[in-house]
Image (cartoon, rainbow, N blue to C red):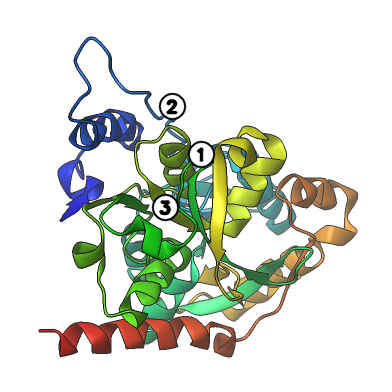
Amino acid sequence: MSVSIHNICKNLPFRLLLTVLFGISLLFCPACSPEEPPVKVDLSKRVANETLMASSAENQFRFGIGSMITPKEGYAYYNQLIQYVGENMGRSIKAVDRDTYDEINNLLEQQKLDVAFVCGGPYIDGKDKFDLELLVLPETDEGPVYYSYLIVPADSPARSLEDLRGKTFAFTDPKSNSGMIVPSYWLARIGETPDSFFSKHIFTYAHDASIKAVIDKLVDGAAVDSLIWDYMNSHNPETGVKTRIIKRSQAFGIPPLVVRPGLPAKEKKQLREILLGMHQDPAGKQILDGMNINRFVLGADADYNTIRNMRDFINRMSQGSE
């Protein structure tokens, strides 16, 4: 059975995810009494729709950044990056925060955003649907790649995906590659779906929320973005102490920065040059270091073909089972 937090509370602020996860956890813990509530996920609402530089609305450059891709601990660095871009463009920057990839993609399609951080899954969907365009890719020590981690509580007996059969599970977002497409692909390869394999599963709409749900044992497992798990672990060792990685995917094209279709070529060129040279500027490098990014590099649409192939395989298997 799929329980979508977004469907339950789509009209609520994201900070109420804590309350919803607490309610969902009661389904997982039938023995818990009102006098002994389970440990709760402690999340804070991220800053939304913050104008980082005062200027006329006509000159604003709109930068999308979603809670699903940004760890709470690193959000300040994303704000600094956005401000850095605005200062170097000589433009007012408006940071627009949304809770789902669909919301970010819809704003890009409607040309209500100019640039955004997205995941590989939303990128290929946007590319197919409305010609969403790659701008640059973050590069880490391993290159412009990342992985999906299958994680469980550190003291869990689970050693493989098969050990989570009949258990509870947290996905991130329905369009997330590492948080939904990859684990669904693993299941499809063995003839299973999330509904057939897990007793219950939820969508947290943030990788750090999925990690916290595993830490607090609200779920038996989760699939998360390796970049966010690694970032959280480097800034808070509790992540590595209280969770354990039992499966790592193949490498995928890293979550990119994208621009809306129709963005003027002059603005696109200026933005790309600022980001590609950011690591050579001491102020820019300091921001990138805080984000665990070495630099930004150019990428290609073909970098995301493996994600397309997985998505298509899942769809074929789903249609075959109907």
Q: Which element carries disc 3, helix, strand or loop?
A: strand
Q: Nearer the viewer, residue 44 or 96?
A: 44
Name the quadrant containing residue 187.
bottom left
Alpha-carbon neighbours of circle 2 within 10 Å: few (<14), some, or many (≥20)? few
Q: Earlier in the sequence, mark 3 or mark 1?
A: 1
User: In this image, 297 relative to 150: left or right?
Assistant: right
Q: Earlier in the sequence, mark 2 or mark 1?
A: 2
Q: Quadrant of the C terminus?
A: bottom left
**Disc number at residue 52?**
none
Q: Looking at the picture, how far across and down is residue 54, in whole percent? A: 57, 38
- The residue positioned 62% from the left and 56% from the top of the image is 227
The residue beneath circle 1 is 155
Label 3–label 1 contact, CB within 8 A:
no
Name the quadrant containing residue 300.
bottom right
The residue beneath circle 3 is 222
**Disc number at residue 42?**
2
User: From mark 2 to mark 3, how far is it between C-alphas?
Assistant: 17 Å
Q: Is residue 299 above or below residue 270?
A: below
Q: Is residue 234 above or below residue 306?
A: above
Q: Number of callouts in the render? A: 3
Q: Nearer the viewer, residue 170 or 19?
A: 170
